[in-house]
Amino acid sequence: MPVTYAETWFPVLIQILIAVGVAGAMVGLSALIGRRVRDTVKSSPYESGMKPIGNARERFSVKFYLVGMVFILFDIEAIFLYPWAVVYRELKQSLTDMDRMFTLLAAGREVPDAPNAPALAVRGAAVRFENVSFAYESARPILHNVDFTIAAGTTTAVVGHSGSGKSTLGRLLFRFYDLDRARGGRILIDGQDIRDVTQDSLRAAIGIVPQDTVLFNDSIYYNIAYGRPSATREEVIAAARAAHIHDFIEGLPAGYETPVGERGLKLSGGEKQRVAIARTLLKDPPLLIFDEATSALDSKSERAIQHELDSIARERTTLIIAHRLSTVVHAEQIIVMDHGRIVERGTHAQLLRAGGLFAQMWALQQQRAAHPEEGDDAVTQQDTAGA
Ligand SMILES: Nc1ncnc2c1ncn2[C@@H]1O[C@H](COP(=O)(O)OP(=O)(O)OP(=O)(O)O)[C@@H](O)[C@H]1O
Ligand SMILES: [Mg+2]
Protein backbone atom coordinates (compact mmCIF):
# COMPACT_ATOMS: atom_id res chain seq x y z
CA MET A 1 0.00 0.00 0.00
CA PRO A 2 1.30 3.49 -0.78
CA VAL A 3 2.13 5.48 2.36
CA THR A 4 0.49 8.88 2.64
CA TYR A 5 1.84 11.67 4.78
CA ALA A 6 -1.28 11.74 6.93
CA GLU A 7 -0.92 8.03 7.72
CA THR A 8 2.46 8.23 9.39
CA TRP A 9 3.17 9.06 12.99
CA PHE A 10 5.73 11.65 11.92
CA PRO A 11 3.45 14.70 11.56
CA VAL A 12 2.06 14.30 15.07
CA LEU A 13 5.44 13.66 16.60
CA ILE A 14 7.01 16.60 14.78
CA GLN A 15 4.25 18.95 15.96
CA ILE A 16 4.67 17.87 19.58
CA LEU A 17 8.45 18.17 19.38
CA ILE A 18 8.29 21.62 17.77
CA ALA A 19 5.87 22.81 20.46
CA VAL A 20 8.03 21.46 23.29
CA GLY A 21 11.24 22.68 21.66
CA VAL A 22 9.99 26.21 20.94
CA ALA A 23 8.45 26.57 24.41
CA GLY A 24 11.63 25.31 26.11
CA ALA A 25 13.91 27.50 24.04
CA MET A 26 11.76 30.57 24.60
CA VAL A 27 11.54 30.16 28.37
CA GLY A 28 15.24 29.43 28.62
CA LEU A 29 16.21 32.22 26.26
CA SER A 30 14.07 34.88 27.92
CA ALA A 31 15.69 34.03 31.22
CA LEU A 32 19.14 34.13 29.64
CA ILE A 33 18.75 37.49 27.97
CA GLY A 34 17.46 38.83 31.21
CA ARG A 35 19.38 40.91 33.66
CA ARG A 36 21.89 38.31 34.67
CA VAL A 37 22.62 36.88 31.21
CA ARG A 38 26.27 37.93 31.29
CA ASP A 39 26.95 36.39 34.66
CA THR A 40 25.11 33.25 33.76
CA VAL A 41 27.11 32.64 30.60
CA LYS A 42 30.37 33.58 32.24
CA SER A 43 29.83 31.26 35.13
CA SER A 44 28.26 28.53 33.05
CA PRO A 45 29.14 25.12 34.42
CA TYR A 46 29.17 23.88 30.84
CA GLU A 47 31.92 26.28 29.95
CA SER A 48 34.28 25.59 32.78
CA GLY A 49 33.37 21.95 33.08
CA MET A 50 34.50 22.14 36.71
CA LYS A 51 32.18 23.38 39.39
CA PRO A 52 28.67 24.69 38.93
CA ILE A 53 28.47 28.42 39.51
CA GLY A 54 25.37 30.61 39.82
CA ASN A 55 22.10 29.97 41.58
CA ALA A 56 19.68 27.13 40.92
CA ARG A 57 17.38 29.26 38.77
CA GLU A 58 20.18 30.29 36.44
CA ARG A 59 21.38 26.75 35.99
CA PHE A 60 17.79 25.67 35.29
CA SER A 61 17.43 28.33 32.58
CA VAL A 62 20.58 27.22 30.82
CA LYS A 63 19.46 23.60 30.87
CA PHE A 64 16.01 24.56 29.59
CA TYR A 65 17.57 26.52 26.75
CA LEU A 66 19.91 23.70 25.74
CA VAL A 67 17.19 21.06 25.91
CA GLY A 68 14.94 23.30 23.79
CA MET A 69 17.69 23.68 21.17
CA VAL A 70 18.23 19.91 21.07
CA PHE A 71 14.50 19.42 20.47
CA ILE A 72 14.51 21.96 17.61
CA LEU A 73 17.54 20.30 16.03
CA PHE A 74 15.81 16.95 16.34
CA ASP A 75 12.69 18.38 14.65
CA ILE A 76 14.73 19.62 11.70
CA GLU A 77 16.38 16.25 11.41
CA ALA A 78 13.03 14.48 11.63
CA ILE A 79 11.64 16.60 8.81
CA PHE A 80 14.58 15.63 6.64
CA LEU A 81 14.22 12.04 7.69
CA TYR A 82 10.52 11.93 6.91
CA PRO A 83 10.74 10.71 3.28
CA TRP A 84 12.94 7.87 4.47
CA ALA A 85 10.06 6.51 6.52
CA VAL A 86 8.05 6.21 3.32
CA VAL A 87 10.98 4.64 1.51
CA TYR A 88 11.50 2.25 4.40
CA ARG A 89 7.91 1.06 4.34
CA GLU A 90 7.90 0.64 0.57
CA LEU A 91 11.19 -1.22 0.75
CA LYS A 92 9.86 -3.53 3.43
CA GLN A 93 6.74 -4.23 1.33
CA SER A 94 8.89 -4.95 -1.74
CA LEU A 95 11.04 -7.35 0.24
CA THR A 96 7.93 -9.16 1.45
CA ASP A 97 6.63 -9.36 -2.13
CA MET A 98 9.99 -10.64 -3.35
CA ASP A 99 9.97 -13.23 -0.63
CA ARG A 100 6.55 -14.42 -1.79
CA MET A 101 7.70 -14.45 -5.39
CA PHE A 102 10.71 -16.63 -4.59
CA THR A 103 8.48 -18.96 -2.60
CA LEU A 104 6.24 -19.24 -5.66
CA LEU A 105 9.18 -19.80 -7.98
CA ALA A 106 10.51 -22.51 -5.69
CA ALA A 107 7.06 -24.12 -5.66
CA GLY A 108 6.99 -24.03 -9.47
CA ARG A 109 10.13 -26.13 -9.57
CA GLU A 110 8.25 -29.08 -8.15
CA VAL A 111 7.64 -30.09 -11.76
CA PRO A 112 11.09 -30.09 -13.34
CA ASP A 113 11.87 -30.35 -17.03
CA ALA A 114 14.03 -33.30 -18.00
CA PRO A 115 17.55 -32.20 -18.98
CA ASN A 116 17.68 -31.44 -22.71
CA ALA A 117 13.94 -32.01 -22.98
CA PRO A 118 12.73 -31.29 -26.53
CA ALA A 119 9.80 -29.04 -27.32
CA LEU A 120 6.40 -30.65 -27.86
CA ALA A 121 5.79 -31.24 -31.56
CA VAL A 122 2.08 -30.70 -32.12
CA ARG A 123 0.47 -32.30 -35.14
CA GLY A 124 -3.25 -32.72 -34.46
CA ALA A 125 -3.00 -32.54 -30.65
CA ALA A 126 -4.47 -35.99 -29.97
CA VAL A 127 -4.61 -36.57 -26.21
CA ARG A 128 -4.23 -39.90 -24.50
CA PHE A 129 -4.65 -40.57 -20.77
CA GLU A 130 -3.17 -44.03 -20.40
CA ASN A 131 -4.06 -45.85 -17.20
CA VAL A 132 -3.59 -42.70 -15.11
CA SER A 133 -3.66 -42.97 -11.32
CA PHE A 134 -2.89 -39.92 -9.23
CA ALA A 135 -2.80 -38.66 -5.66
CA TYR A 136 -2.06 -35.12 -4.45
CA GLU A 137 -1.07 -36.69 -1.13
CA SER A 138 -0.04 -40.31 -1.23
CA ALA A 139 -2.46 -41.27 1.54
CA ARG A 140 -5.47 -40.16 -0.50
CA PRO A 141 -5.66 -41.46 -4.10
CA ILE A 142 -7.79 -39.24 -6.35
CA LEU A 143 -7.69 -40.86 -9.80
CA HIS A 144 -7.83 -44.61 -10.40
CA ASN A 145 -6.74 -46.09 -13.76
CA VAL A 146 -8.28 -43.34 -15.84
CA ASP A 147 -7.94 -44.28 -19.49
CA PHE A 148 -9.34 -42.38 -22.46
CA THR A 149 -8.36 -40.83 -25.77
CA ILE A 150 -9.40 -37.54 -27.33
CA ALA A 151 -8.97 -37.91 -31.08
CA ALA A 152 -7.29 -34.95 -32.76
CA GLY A 153 -9.75 -32.13 -33.43
CA THR A 154 -12.60 -33.63 -31.40
CA THR A 155 -14.34 -32.66 -28.18
CA THR A 156 -14.50 -34.80 -25.08
CA ALA A 157 -16.66 -33.69 -22.17
CA VAL A 158 -16.08 -34.80 -18.60
CA VAL A 159 -19.01 -34.75 -16.20
CA GLY A 160 -19.54 -36.13 -12.72
CA HIS A 161 -20.14 -35.30 -9.10
CA SER A 162 -18.25 -32.53 -7.38
CA GLY A 163 -14.89 -33.85 -6.21
CA SER A 164 -14.85 -36.77 -8.63
CA GLY A 165 -11.53 -35.62 -10.12
CA LYS A 166 -12.58 -33.69 -13.24
CA SER A 167 -10.44 -30.60 -12.70
CA THR A 168 -7.54 -32.84 -11.71
CA LEU A 169 -7.51 -34.19 -15.29
CA GLY A 170 -7.04 -30.64 -16.62
CA ARG A 171 -4.33 -29.84 -14.07
CA LEU A 172 -2.41 -32.99 -15.01
CA LEU A 173 -2.69 -32.29 -18.73
CA PHE A 174 -1.35 -28.77 -18.13
CA ARG A 175 1.37 -30.33 -15.98
CA PHE A 176 0.70 -28.47 -12.77
CA TYR A 177 1.58 -31.87 -11.33
CA ASP A 178 3.62 -34.68 -12.80
CA LEU A 179 2.50 -38.29 -12.72
CA ASP A 180 4.55 -40.53 -10.50
CA ARG A 181 6.56 -42.76 -12.86
CA ALA A 182 6.41 -45.59 -10.34
CA ARG A 183 2.63 -45.85 -10.76
CA GLY A 184 3.00 -46.51 -14.46
CA GLY A 185 0.39 -44.22 -16.04
CA ARG A 186 1.14 -41.77 -18.87
CA ILE A 187 -0.37 -38.74 -20.53
CA LEU A 188 0.50 -38.36 -24.19
CA ILE A 189 -0.03 -35.58 -26.71
CA ASP A 190 0.50 -36.78 -30.27
CA GLY A 191 2.34 -39.76 -28.85
CA GLN A 192 4.77 -37.73 -26.69
CA ASP A 193 4.80 -38.24 -22.94
CA ILE A 194 4.18 -34.74 -21.56
CA ARG A 195 6.78 -35.32 -18.83
CA ASP A 196 9.47 -35.61 -21.51
CA VAL A 197 8.86 -32.28 -23.27
CA THR A 198 9.45 -28.75 -22.01
CA GLN A 199 6.69 -27.21 -19.93
CA ASP A 200 6.91 -24.01 -21.96
CA SER A 201 6.18 -25.76 -25.25
CA LEU A 202 3.41 -27.83 -23.63
CA ARG A 203 1.71 -24.80 -22.12
CA ALA A 204 2.07 -22.81 -25.32
CA ALA A 205 -0.04 -25.50 -27.02
CA ILE A 206 -2.82 -25.46 -24.44
CA GLY A 207 -5.42 -22.80 -23.77
CA ILE A 208 -7.13 -23.21 -20.45
CA VAL A 209 -10.16 -21.45 -19.02
CA PRO A 210 -9.90 -22.61 -15.43
CA GLN A 211 -12.64 -23.07 -12.89
CA ASP A 212 -11.26 -20.17 -10.84
CA THR A 213 -9.66 -17.51 -12.99
CA VAL A 214 -6.81 -15.63 -11.40
CA LEU A 215 -6.07 -12.28 -13.01
CA PHE A 216 -2.84 -10.31 -12.94
CA ASN A 217 -2.72 -7.10 -10.95
CA ASP A 218 -2.54 -5.09 -14.16
CA SER A 219 -4.85 -3.52 -16.75
CA ILE A 220 -7.73 -5.41 -18.35
CA TYR A 221 -5.89 -5.00 -21.65
CA TYR A 222 -2.79 -6.71 -20.27
CA ASN A 223 -4.88 -9.52 -18.83
CA ILE A 224 -6.43 -10.31 -22.20
CA ALA A 225 -3.26 -9.68 -24.24
CA TYR A 226 -1.40 -12.13 -22.00
CA GLY A 227 -2.95 -14.87 -24.15
CA ARG A 228 -0.73 -13.68 -27.01
CA PRO A 229 1.49 -10.72 -26.11
CA SER A 230 2.33 -10.08 -29.77
CA ALA A 231 -1.34 -9.50 -30.66
CA THR A 232 -2.40 -6.14 -32.07
CA ARG A 233 -4.90 -3.92 -30.25
CA GLU A 234 -7.54 -4.81 -32.86
CA GLU A 235 -7.04 -8.52 -32.17
CA VAL A 236 -7.32 -7.98 -28.42
CA ILE A 237 -10.56 -6.06 -28.89
CA ALA A 238 -11.91 -8.71 -31.28
CA ALA A 239 -11.26 -11.38 -28.63
CA ALA A 240 -12.99 -9.26 -26.00
CA ARG A 241 -15.99 -8.84 -28.31
CA ALA A 242 -16.18 -12.57 -28.93
CA ALA A 243 -16.14 -13.16 -25.16
CA HIS A 244 -18.94 -10.58 -24.75
CA ILE A 245 -16.89 -8.39 -22.43
CA HIS A 246 -16.00 -5.53 -24.82
CA ASP A 247 -19.08 -3.39 -24.07
CA PHE A 248 -18.56 -3.78 -20.34
CA ILE A 249 -14.91 -2.70 -20.66
CA GLU A 250 -15.78 0.27 -22.87
CA GLY A 251 -18.27 1.41 -20.24
CA LEU A 252 -15.54 1.74 -17.61
CA PRO A 253 -14.10 5.24 -17.15
CA ALA A 254 -10.56 4.07 -17.99
CA GLY A 255 -11.73 1.45 -20.54
CA TYR A 256 -9.14 -1.18 -21.40
CA GLU A 257 -6.57 0.55 -19.19
CA THR A 258 -8.64 -0.04 -16.05
CA PRO A 259 -6.47 -1.82 -13.52
CA VAL A 260 -7.95 -5.01 -12.11
CA GLY A 261 -7.26 -6.86 -8.91
CA GLU A 262 -5.87 -5.68 -5.62
CA ARG A 263 -5.41 -2.03 -6.56
CA GLY A 264 -8.17 -1.65 -9.11
CA LEU A 265 -11.51 -2.88 -10.18
CA LYS A 266 -12.73 -6.08 -8.63
CA LEU A 267 -14.34 -8.14 -11.38
CA SER A 268 -17.29 -10.41 -10.72
CA GLY A 269 -16.91 -14.14 -11.25
CA GLY A 270 -18.64 -13.95 -14.63
CA GLU A 271 -16.56 -10.97 -15.77
CA LYS A 272 -13.34 -12.74 -14.79
CA GLN A 273 -14.48 -15.81 -16.65
CA ARG A 274 -15.12 -13.74 -19.77
CA VAL A 275 -11.65 -12.16 -19.51
CA ALA A 276 -10.19 -15.68 -19.32
CA ILE A 277 -12.25 -16.73 -22.34
CA ALA A 278 -11.06 -13.67 -24.30
CA ARG A 279 -7.46 -14.50 -23.36
CA THR A 280 -7.89 -18.06 -24.61
CA LEU A 281 -9.64 -17.00 -27.82
CA LEU A 282 -6.70 -14.65 -28.47
CA LYS A 283 -4.15 -17.38 -27.75
CA ASP A 284 -5.91 -19.63 -30.27
CA PRO A 285 -4.06 -22.83 -29.27
CA PRO A 286 -4.42 -26.30 -30.82
CA LEU A 287 -5.61 -27.83 -27.53
CA LEU A 288 -8.30 -26.37 -25.28
CA ILE A 289 -9.40 -27.07 -21.74
CA PHE A 290 -12.61 -25.44 -20.53
CA ASP A 291 -13.13 -26.18 -16.86
CA GLU A 292 -16.64 -24.98 -16.02
CA ALA A 293 -15.77 -22.07 -18.32
CA THR A 294 -19.25 -20.56 -18.14
CA SER A 295 -20.34 -21.70 -14.69
CA ALA A 296 -20.42 -18.18 -13.25
CA LEU A 297 -22.57 -16.80 -16.05
CA ASP A 298 -26.35 -16.52 -16.15
CA SER A 299 -28.03 -18.74 -18.72
CA LYS A 300 -28.50 -15.92 -21.24
CA SER A 301 -24.81 -14.90 -21.22
CA GLU A 302 -23.83 -18.55 -21.17
CA ARG A 303 -25.83 -19.26 -24.33
CA ALA A 304 -24.28 -16.24 -26.06
CA ILE A 305 -20.72 -17.25 -25.21
CA GLN A 306 -21.35 -20.94 -25.80
CA HIS A 307 -21.67 -20.14 -29.46
CA GLU A 308 -18.15 -18.63 -29.50
CA LEU A 309 -16.72 -21.51 -27.51
CA ASP A 310 -18.31 -24.04 -29.88
CA SER A 311 -16.85 -22.26 -32.87
CA ILE A 312 -13.30 -22.11 -31.43
CA ALA A 313 -13.57 -25.74 -30.28
CA ARG A 314 -14.43 -26.88 -33.78
CA GLU A 315 -11.32 -28.27 -35.51
CA ARG A 316 -9.46 -28.23 -32.17
CA THR A 317 -8.90 -30.90 -29.59
CA THR A 318 -11.03 -29.89 -26.62
CA LEU A 319 -11.54 -31.14 -23.10
CA ILE A 320 -14.68 -29.62 -21.61
CA ILE A 321 -15.54 -30.04 -17.96
CA ALA A 322 -19.14 -29.06 -17.48
CA HIS A 323 -21.85 -29.23 -14.92
CA ARG A 324 -24.61 -28.03 -17.22
CA LEU A 325 -25.08 -31.13 -19.34
CA SER A 326 -27.02 -29.31 -22.04
CA THR A 327 -23.79 -27.53 -23.02
CA VAL A 328 -22.04 -30.77 -23.98
CA VAL A 329 -24.79 -32.54 -25.94
CA HIS A 330 -22.74 -32.30 -29.13
CA ALA A 331 -19.44 -33.59 -27.74
CA GLU A 332 -18.03 -36.55 -29.69
CA GLN A 333 -17.46 -38.30 -26.39
CA ILE A 334 -18.80 -37.81 -22.87
CA ILE A 335 -16.93 -39.32 -19.94
CA VAL A 336 -18.76 -39.75 -16.63
CA MET A 337 -16.51 -39.74 -13.57
CA ASP A 338 -17.34 -40.94 -10.09
CA HIS A 339 -14.87 -41.01 -7.21
CA GLY A 340 -11.86 -40.77 -9.52
CA ARG A 341 -13.01 -43.53 -11.88
CA ILE A 342 -14.59 -43.46 -15.32
CA VAL A 343 -17.96 -45.11 -14.82
CA GLU A 344 -19.57 -44.45 -18.21
CA ARG A 345 -18.57 -43.16 -21.61
CA GLY A 346 -20.24 -42.56 -24.95
CA THR A 347 -22.19 -39.97 -26.89
CA HIS A 348 -25.09 -38.13 -25.30
CA ALA A 349 -27.60 -40.41 -27.02
CA GLN A 350 -25.74 -43.58 -26.04
CA LEU A 351 -25.51 -42.52 -22.41
CA LEU A 352 -29.20 -41.66 -22.22
CA ARG A 353 -30.04 -45.06 -23.66
CA ALA A 354 -27.77 -46.76 -21.14
CA GLY A 355 -29.91 -45.32 -18.34
CA GLY A 356 -27.02 -44.97 -15.85
CA LEU A 357 -25.59 -42.11 -13.82
CA PHE A 358 -25.54 -39.73 -16.79
CA ALA A 359 -29.20 -40.40 -17.57
CA GLN A 360 -30.10 -39.70 -13.94
CA MET A 361 -28.15 -36.44 -13.90
CA TRP A 362 -29.72 -35.42 -17.19
CA ALA A 363 -33.25 -36.15 -15.97
CA LEU A 364 -32.66 -34.11 -12.84
CA GLN A 365 -31.37 -31.09 -14.78
CA GLN A 366 -34.21 -31.28 -17.29
CA GLN A 367 -36.67 -31.32 -14.41
CA ARG A 368 -35.04 -28.23 -12.87
CA ALA A 369 -35.05 -26.42 -16.21
CA ALA A 370 -38.75 -27.14 -16.57
CA HIS A 371 -39.42 -25.50 -13.21
CA PRO A 372 -37.86 -22.08 -13.55
CA GLU A 373 -39.09 -21.05 -10.09
CA GLU A 374 -36.32 -23.25 -8.75
CA GLY A 375 -34.11 -21.28 -11.07
CA ASP A 376 -32.04 -22.51 -13.94
CA ASP A 377 -29.37 -20.12 -12.75
CA ALA A 378 -29.38 -21.84 -9.41
CA VAL A 379 -28.33 -25.02 -11.17
CA THR A 380 -24.83 -25.38 -9.84
CA GLN A 381 -22.51 -28.02 -8.57
CA GLN A 382 -25.31 -29.48 -6.50
CA ASP A 383 -26.86 -30.79 -9.67
CA THR A 384 -24.09 -33.16 -10.24
CA ALA A 385 -23.37 -33.57 -6.57
CA GLY A 386 -26.91 -34.41 -5.61
CA ALA A 387 -27.96 -36.42 -8.65
N1 LIG B 1 -4.18 -29.35 -4.37
C1 LIG B 1 -4.86 -30.36 -3.82
N2 LIG B 1 -4.36 -31.03 -2.76
C2 LIG B 1 -5.02 -32.05 -2.22
N3 LIG B 1 -6.21 -32.51 -2.64
C3 LIG B 1 -6.78 -31.88 -3.68
C4 LIG B 1 -6.13 -30.78 -4.33
N4 LIG B 1 -6.92 -30.36 -5.32
C5 LIG B 1 -8.00 -31.16 -5.31
N5 LIG B 1 -7.92 -32.07 -4.34
C6 LIG B 1 -8.90 -33.14 -4.05
O1 LIG B 1 -9.04 -33.95 -5.21
C7 LIG B 1 -10.38 -34.34 -5.40
C8 LIG B 1 -10.78 -34.04 -6.81
O2 LIG B 1 -10.70 -32.64 -7.01
P1 LIG B 1 -11.13 -31.98 -8.38
O3 LIG B 1 -10.86 -30.52 -8.25
O4 LIG B 1 -10.48 -32.71 -9.49
O5 LIG B 1 -12.70 -32.25 -8.39
P2 LIG B 1 -13.79 -31.83 -9.48
O6 LIG B 1 -14.37 -33.09 -10.02
O7 LIG B 1 -13.23 -30.88 -10.42
O8 LIG B 1 -14.88 -31.14 -8.54
P3 LIG B 1 -15.81 -29.87 -8.85
O9 LIG B 1 -16.93 -30.34 -9.72
O10 LIG B 1 -16.29 -29.47 -7.51
O11 LIG B 1 -14.97 -28.84 -9.47
C9 LIG B 1 -11.20 -33.59 -4.35
O12 LIG B 1 -11.59 -34.50 -3.37
C10 LIG B 1 -10.26 -32.57 -3.80
O13 LIG B 1 -10.46 -32.43 -2.41
MG1 LIG C 1 -13.47 -28.88 -10.72
Image: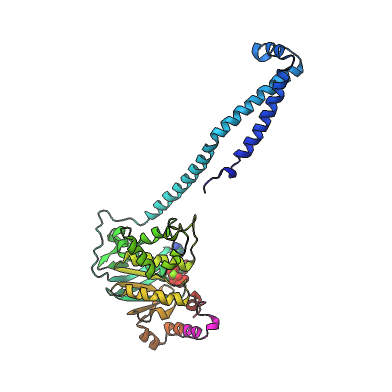
Q: Nearer the viewer, residue 289 or 386?
A: 289
Whether residue 295 appears in this view of the structure is yes
Residue 95 screen position, x and y as percent: 46, 44
Q: Residue furthest bottom?
A: 353
Q: Nearer the viewer, residue 42 or 319?
A: 42
Query: Which corner quadrant of the figure contains ligand 1?
Result: bottom left
Task: Relative to 111, say whether 25 is above or below.
Answer: above
Task: Relative to 174, say whether 310 is above or below.
Answer: below
Majority secondary structure in the magenta region: helix
Q: Is residue 117 magenta?
A: no
Whether residue 208 appears in this view of the structure is no
Residue 162 screen position, x and y as percent: 47, 73
Looking at the rendering, which quadrant does residue 36 occupy?
Answer: top right
Q: Nearer the viewer, residue 129 or 153?
A: 153
Colour scheme used in the picture? Answer: rainbow
Q: Which residues are magenta?
A: 363-377
Task: Relative to 2, say whether 329 is above or below.
Answer: below
Residue 24 screen position, x and y as percent: 69, 27
